[in-house]
């Protein structure tokens, strides 16, 4: 670039200082991941002796073997898949048709529904009434309860509706000439044209489902139904103070720390796989969400 | 008059019959909002009852504001309320500026490839669950093998059991929240920076401005409206703190600095079973939150032409 010549010495120093500071920030973001990965691949003895700081020491897969042979890990992993994909599917099934209907300006009562939905951004009943409501509906300790109870959100509905509203009239009119029903119109015209918004919402749902633990912890009682994050919470947070459990895990090959690190890495990997793809959409989604009603 | 009223009713009926398909498409979502977000609002009445889960809402006796009186006499609730405000306030001071600084720094990176890589990395922690973040924090701060204490020991210092000490809780909570979210939050500011007109920089360059001056005099003032809006949102959310994360990190020995209203509600209502008292606490918090968010939105409408929603 020609403009490079225009930079003075001060500008160059500024550029370097900026690059160094930013690199430090990036490294400190990355370091915890590297550390956890290193611990998960090291021997328990090396970790307990405090020898692992960056690279794995005495590389071994013992911790992963231990984790992958735990039946509860697989049960929880399977449950997370059910909640993530079942929940996301349910979200789209409810929100896409609803948002489409609300995007039709001629719909009577549209303002009422729009306000009712936007109001939930501002005010919600809170933890206890929501919990008691789930109880009254018979959705405690129920897989279906987890899937349906968190299916819609005002933010996502508004995002979809805004996108549907922006679809040019001409597309719609052409289809109407052919006598298409509303459902056909939605399926054949609006959904294909709104793919970016729908993918964005789907990814929002997937990530929040994959990472959510609180309500699963509160609502589910059965061991067989808990998702990965609740399993992780039990192992990492609840058992951490339990020294007896921690020392029971300590062998020459793996220890409490290497095992918990291995579980963490195992739960991060799927996120890392979809992340490069998801990132673009998230950036867009954040900006779309801020668009005026 | 009567005729026009009937005519209007007739029109309405006609429109509704014409759009029956749309109502059918809307129905599942409308029912969902009614059942999962509006029905619980009716459940808020138990804040004014001596509620028993066996008697239910219909048969539990009404007690007026007794639960609120009990709440305001409860030292634990008062403490939780002030902790909420304090933690949010500290977040406003220490966490809020970080994404702005990051965005400004990203903007100064000339190498496109390096910039994209850096962004990809700092957005990543946003996508990691709080359980894992808590796991990492617990791991790092472990008194025996934690990397922080290993470092302290190598300097000849005593190791510290950080997570059991109340004075360390807030720095740990805010610091790890910055690690998790500030990268992702910088997206909004980067978008604002992308909207700054290049001609401003060109004419500044002609006038011999340095990059530092351009950052201060052009970039920062141009993204000021965005900063103000984000600040207003943040203030609107003053009584909401990331309690899902706090629950994972706090313990009885750190309650005095860590316990916030939501964690108080969780303990009294879901771990204990004082549903009425916990609901009163939740209603109190929700009303404050509503007032704050509502005023925040009103103010931001005035500050900028685009409202938040």
Image: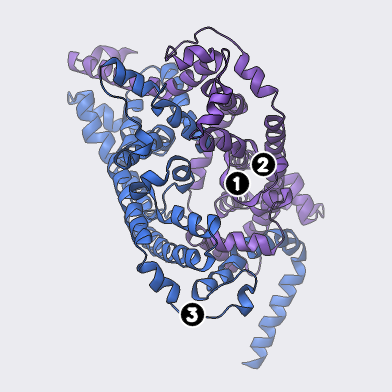
Chain colours: A purple, B blue
Circle 1 marks a residue in which chain?
A
Image quarter in which the N terminus of chain A is found: top left
Residue A7 can be seen in this image: no
Residue drawn at x 39%, y 73% as measured from the top left: B69
Give the alpha-carbon distance from disc 3 to disc 2, as whole Å. 38 Å
Q: Nearer the viewer, residue A229 or B198?
A: A229
- Residue B189, image quadrant: top left
Residues at marks 1 and 2, CA–CA distance in whole angstroms: 7 Å
Which mark identifies residue A165? none
Characterize the local packing of mark 2: few (<14), some (14-19) or many (20 or more) Cα atoms within 10 angstroms. many
Q: Would you place residue B65 above or below residue A229 in this image?
A: below
Which label sits on residue B63?
3
Where residue A277 sits in the image (x, y, percent)?
Answer: 59, 27
> Is the Cβ of the residue at disc 1 closer than 8 Å to that at disc 2?
yes
Mark 3 burial class by Cα count in 10 Å: few <14, some 14-19, many 20+: few
Q: Along the polypeptide, which appears first: circle 1 or circle 2?
A: 1
In the rendered view, does A120 fall on the left or right side of A20?
A: right
Q: Residue at x 57, y 37 (%)?
A: A234
Q: Which residue in the protein does label 2 denote? A: A226
The residue at which mark 1 appears reads as A217
The structure residue drawn at horizontal position 53% and vertical position 27%, both measured from the top left corner, is A246
Secondary structure at numbered mark 2: loop
């Amino acid at each position: 670039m020609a403009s490079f010549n225009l930079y003075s010495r001060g500008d160059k120093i500024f550029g370097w200082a900026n690059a160094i500071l930013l690199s430090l920030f990036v490294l400190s973001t990355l370091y915890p991941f590297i550390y956890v990965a290193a611990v998960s691949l090291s021997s328990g003895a090396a970790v307990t002796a405090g020898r692992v700081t960056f690279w794995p020491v005495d590389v071994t897969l013992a911790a992963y073997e231990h984790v992958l042979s735990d039946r509860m890990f697989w049960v929880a992993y399977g449950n997370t898949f059910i909640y993530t994909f079942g929940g996301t599917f349910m979200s789209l099934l409810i929100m896409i048709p609803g948002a489409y209907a609300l995007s039709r300006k001629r719909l009577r009562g549209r303002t009422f529904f729009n306000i009712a939905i936007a109001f939930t951004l501002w005010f919600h009943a809170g933890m206890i009434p929501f919990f008691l409501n789930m109880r009254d509906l018979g959705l405690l300790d129920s897989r279906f309860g987890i899937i349906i109870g968190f299916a819609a959100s005002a933010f996502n509905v508004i995002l979809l509706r805004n996108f549907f509203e922006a679809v040019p009239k001409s597309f719609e009119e052409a289809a109407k000439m052919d006598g298409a029903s509303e459902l056909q119109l939605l399926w054949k015209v609006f959904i294909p044209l709104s793919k970016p918004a729908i993918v964005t919402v789907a990814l929002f749902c997937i990530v929040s489902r994959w990472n959510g633990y609180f309500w699963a912890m509160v609502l589910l009682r059965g061991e067989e139904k808990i998702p990965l994050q609740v399993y992780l919470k039990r192992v990492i947070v609840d058992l951490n103070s339990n020294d007896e459990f921690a020392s029971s895990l300590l062998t020459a090959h793996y220890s409490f720390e290497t095992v918990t690190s291995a579980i963490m890495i195992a739960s991060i990997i799927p996120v890392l796989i979809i992340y490069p793809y998801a990132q673009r959409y998230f950036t867009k989604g954040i900006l779309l969400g801020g668009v005026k009603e | 008059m009567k005729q026009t009223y009937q005519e209007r009713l007739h029109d309405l009926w006609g429109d509704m019959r014409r759009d029956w398909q749309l109502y059918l498409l809307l129905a599942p979502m409308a029912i969902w909002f009614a059942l999962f977000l509006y029905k619980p609002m009716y459940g808020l009445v138990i804040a004014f009852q001596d509620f028993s889960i066996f008697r239910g809402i219909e048969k539990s006796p009404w007690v007026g504001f007794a639960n609120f009186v009990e709440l305001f006499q409860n030292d634990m609730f008062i403490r939780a309320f002030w902790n909420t405000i304090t933690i949010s306030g500290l977040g406003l001071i220490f966490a809020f500026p970080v994404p702005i600084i990051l965005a400004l720094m990203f903007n100064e990176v000339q190498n496109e490839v390096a910039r994209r890589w850096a962004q990809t990395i700092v957005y990543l922690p946003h996508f990691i669950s709080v359980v894992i973040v808590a796991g990492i924090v617990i791991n790092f701060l472990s008194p025996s093998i934690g990397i922080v204490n290993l470092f302290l020991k190598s300097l000849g210092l005593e190791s510290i059991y950080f997570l059991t000490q109340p004075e360390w809780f807030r720095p740990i909570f805010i610091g790890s929240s910055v690690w998790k979210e500030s990268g992702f939050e910088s997206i909004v500011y980067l978008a604002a920076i992308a909207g700054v007109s290049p001609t401003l920089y060109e004419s500044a360059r002609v006038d011999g401005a340095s990059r530092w001056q351009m950052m201060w005099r052009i970039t920062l003032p141009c993204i000021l409206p965005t900063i103000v809006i984000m600040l207003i949102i943040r203030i609107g959310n003053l009584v909401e703190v990331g309690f899902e994360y706090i629950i994972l990190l706090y313990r009885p020995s750190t309650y005095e600095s860590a316990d916030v209203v939501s964690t108080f509600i969780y303990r009294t209502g879901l771990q204990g079973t004082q549903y009425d008292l916990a609901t009163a606490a939740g209603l109190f918090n929700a009303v404050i939150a509503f007032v704050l968010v509502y005023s925040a939105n009103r103010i931001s409408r005035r500050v900028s032409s685009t409202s938040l929603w």
